[in-house]
Image (cartoon, grey):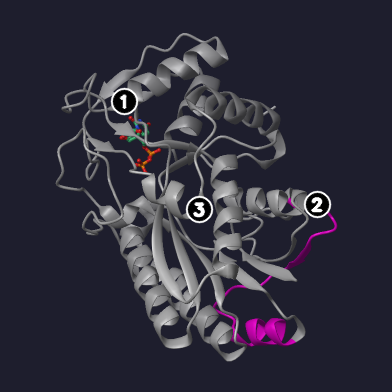
Amino acid sequence: MTWLITGGAGYIGAHVVSQAANSGLKTFVVDDLSTGISTRLKSEIELRKFSLQDTSSLQALFQEHDFEGVVHIAAKKRVGESVERPDYYWQENVVGYQNLLGVMAKHDVKNLVFSSSAAVYGEPNESSDSLISESTMCSPINPYGETKLECERLSEAFSGETGAKVISLRYFNVAGAGRPDLGDQYIFNLIPIVFDALDRGQQPQVFGNDYETIDGTCVRDYVHVQDLAKAHMDAMEHVVTAQPFYLPINIGTGYGASVAQVLAMISEVTGQKIDPIVAPRRQGDPASLVADVSRAAEILNWNSEQGLREIVSSAWDAWQLSHK
Ligand code: UDP
């Protein structure tokens, strides 16, 4: 049977679709192509272009297909933009998801994997060397994180009301590429921002070097998008056989890398000298965000396999392909 992947033409979605195809799983993609790119998908993957705001297209699709389950990845994900346009983010991320859940309920589709984010945690109070577990209090600090937390609440309610089996995967810092043509085309996160600066002959900026971390720069948990895609496969497999439940699961590596360490790795991989400019702290940046990944290991038998070197080198290969 077929799984519906919303946002399947996006950076993360296309990795999920590609891995599903490699493991013999049939997928059908819905994407409004606002940030997704249809050429990321092999020609045999069925793609329908519409927004989840369009309930009648959703209804029609579920009438035509008997979906085994849904992986809901489609969303707006730019933190800064969410601060400028909170209502738009609510409409796109929350209302779009409500539409999807309504149609799933009507058609009795009970297997669901939802793309959440470590943004639900906000700025955790824990000391900077402690890991973030799923029981860490959720307290988002921007509208993007608020929409993800609200969608998690909707997911839990959906499970309670319909008997659905639902996993929310809380992504930490996703980067890298499974294939060069599947790379992240946008310049919103640290690694592509640094590549872009190097291409322009500029030095990258480090937002703050006086945090209480190993070298003063912020620490994050960078997880390879290919490992993340595998976590989706494992979550899909798990929900199908499970009893009704709702569970958030962190997806990271359990290891942190500081901005300075990421820059050092980029310098090593690209062979370019990096002498960063120290800029003031960026508002709302916690010193350290590293996942406790024990639940993913316990429930999904999932562990990340790739490290920072593989992340940076695969991201660099993808960057060079798309910025030739
Ligand atoms: N960062 C930086 N310089 C940049 C972009 C990001 O020092 O030009 C830092 C940022 O402060 C954070 C880390 O890199 O500590 C990762 O930032 P990103 O925006 O990629 O992800 P976030 O963790 O904010 O979701």
Give, as a single range, the part of the protein colored magenta.
41-63
Q: Secondary structure at mark 1?
A: strand
Residue that lies at the very extreme toward the bottom in this rendered image: 106
Residue 315 coordinates in the image, percent (x, y): 58, 30
Residue 214 coordinates in the image, percent (x, y): 23, 21
Local crowd size for mark 1, using a 10 Å CA cut-off: few (<14), some (14–19), many (≥20) = many
Q: Give the amino acid type for the residue marked by disc 2 in the picture.
A: Lys
Residue 174 coordinates in the image, percent (x, y): 48, 42
**At x 38% / y 68%, what residue is drawn?**
152
- Does the rendering let one see residue 146? yes
Ligand 1: give its quadrant.
top left
Q: Nearer the viewer, mark 3 or mark 2?
A: 3
Which residue has dot 2 on it?
42
Q: Give the amino acid type for the residue marked by disc 1 in the picture.
A: Val
Which residue has dot 3 on it?
300
Residue 183 magenta: no
Q: Are marks 3 and 2 in contact (CB under 8 Å)?
A: no
Which residue has dot 1 on it?
206
Residue 166 lies, with reference to residue 302, above or below; the image says below
Quarter residue 63 falls in: bottom right
Local crowd size for mark 2, using a 10 Å CA cut-off: few (<14), some (14–19), many (≥20) = few
Local crowd size for mark 3, using a 10 Å CA cut-off: few (<14), some (14–19), many (≥20) = some
- Does the rendering let one see residue 84? no
